Amino acid sequence: MPLGQNDYIWAFNEESFMENFIVSARKYRPDTFQTVVGQASITSTLKNAIKNSQLAHAYLFCGPRGVGKTTCARIFAKTINCQNLSAEIESCNECESCKAFDGNRSYNIHELDAASNNSVDDIRNLTDQVRIPPQIGKYSVYIIDEVHMLSSSAFNAFLKTLEEPPHHAIFILATTEKHKIIPTILSRCQIFDFNRIKISDIASHLLHVAKSESVVAESEALNVIAQKADGAMRDALSIFDQIVSFSGRNISYKDVISNLNVLDYDYYFRLIDLFLKNDVSGSLLLFNEILDHGFEGHHFITGLSSHFRDVMVCKDPVTIQLLEVGGEIKEKYKIQATRCDNDFLIGALQIANECDLQYKASQNKRLLVELAIIKISQLTLKKK
C-alpha cells in the first residue's frame, strides 16, 4: 500500500528525532573540572598540578565503573593543552587546541582501548607513535582504558616507555581493577582512587538533567534511581533515560519502582507496624502480597534488613546523616524510629541477617523467610 503525504511527513519527523536524540550519559558528560560530580579532591589535585606546572609523566585513574575516570582524563588532556587558561584553571573552549578537541579532531589526545588492543605489537605501535611531538599545544596525551587487560608481555614492553617517555608525552591509564596491574607499572604512576558517587550527589545531578530536559520528577523517584545506580553516574543517567521512555515528561515515584522492579518503602513501613503489634497473620499475608507482585524472597529479606538498619540510624541525631533518602520518606523513618526500641531493632536485624545468609542453601526458601517473619513478630511479645 503506497504511503500518503502525511505518512511521509510523520516518517521524516520520526527519523529526524531518532537522529537528534543523544543519550543523557553522553549529552551531559562533564567537559570541565567544575562540572565533574563527586570527585572534588581529585579535580582539585589535578588543577593544582596544572597551575604549579608539576605534571607527572604517568597517571593511574582507578575506581568503579561510571564514576568519571575517562572523563577526567579527557578534561585533564584538554586543559593542559589550552592556550588561554582561565583563572580557575579551566579550558577556554576558544583556542585552536580546545576547538580541535571539541570537534574530535585533536592530534594531541590519543585513546587506546586495552581490552581489544592488548598485544605486544599494539604497545610497540604506541611507543613508536609517542616519539612524534605535538603540532599544536605542549603535550601529547595517551589515554589507555581498561589497562588491566594488557597481557603480561605487553606490560613489560610498555615499562621503559612509561618510565622515561619524551618530555611532551603524558600517559593516563584507567582501570576498574587496580589489583590486576603489575607492581612495576604502579610504581611508575601517580595513583588516583575515584570514589563511588554519593546518592545525594547523583540525585542532585539528575534533578539538573531533568530541569534541562523539561522533565518533572519527584525527589523520591530520583533518589530511587540514584540508589539503583550503585554509585555510578553513567548507570544513573541510563536508568533516567529508561524511565523517561516509560513515563514521559512526568516521572513519579510509582513509575520508577514499577519500571525498575523496586519494592515500595511503604510495604516495609506497614510490616514494621505489624511486627510491633505482634500480628503474625497480618505479617504473613503482607509477605504473600509481596510475592504475588513478583518479588522473590531474597530480594524481600535483604530489603527488610536495610529497612531495619535505616530505622536504627534514625534513632540517634548523630547517625541520621547516614540515611540516604530524603523528603517525606525520611520523615516516615524518623516517626517509625520513635516507636521502635533498640532491643527490637537489633534482634530483628540478627534474624533477618541469619535468614539472608541461609537463603541460598535452603530447600524451602519461602518457609525460611516466613519463619524469620514469625520470629520478628514475637520479639516484643517476649518482652511483654
Image: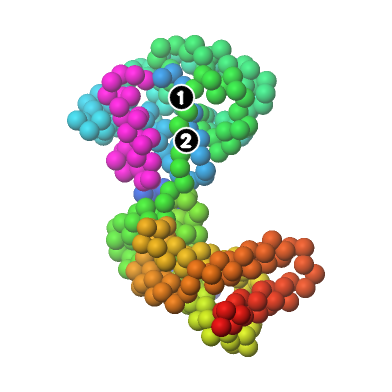
Residue at the location (37% across, 20% down)?
Answer: 55
As for residue 77 lying within the magenta part, the answer is no
Determine if residue 265 is in view. no
Amino acid under disc 2: Asp
Out of 33 and 370, give the one closest to the viewer: 370
**Residue 201 percent location from the top left of the image:** 37, 53
Q: Where is 90 relative to 329, above or below?
A: above
Graded by Cα atoms within 10 Å as few (under 14), some (14 to 19) or many (20 or more), the crowding at tag 2 reads some
As for residue 45 lying within the magenta part, the answer is yes
Out of 74 and 46, give the one closest to the viewer: 46
**Residue 380 percent location from the top left of the image:** 56, 79
Determine if residue 369 is in view. yes
Out of 238 and 43, give the one closest to the viewer: 43
Which mark identifies residue 190?
A: 1
Graded by Cα atoms within 10 Å as few (under 14), some (14 to 19) or many (20 or more), the crowding at tag 1 reads some
- Residue interval drawn in magenta: 29-55
Q: Where is 88 relative to 317, above or below?
A: above
Q: Left of 192 or right of it: where is 373? A: right
Q: Left of 153 or right of it: where is 309? A: left
Residue farthest right in this picture: 363
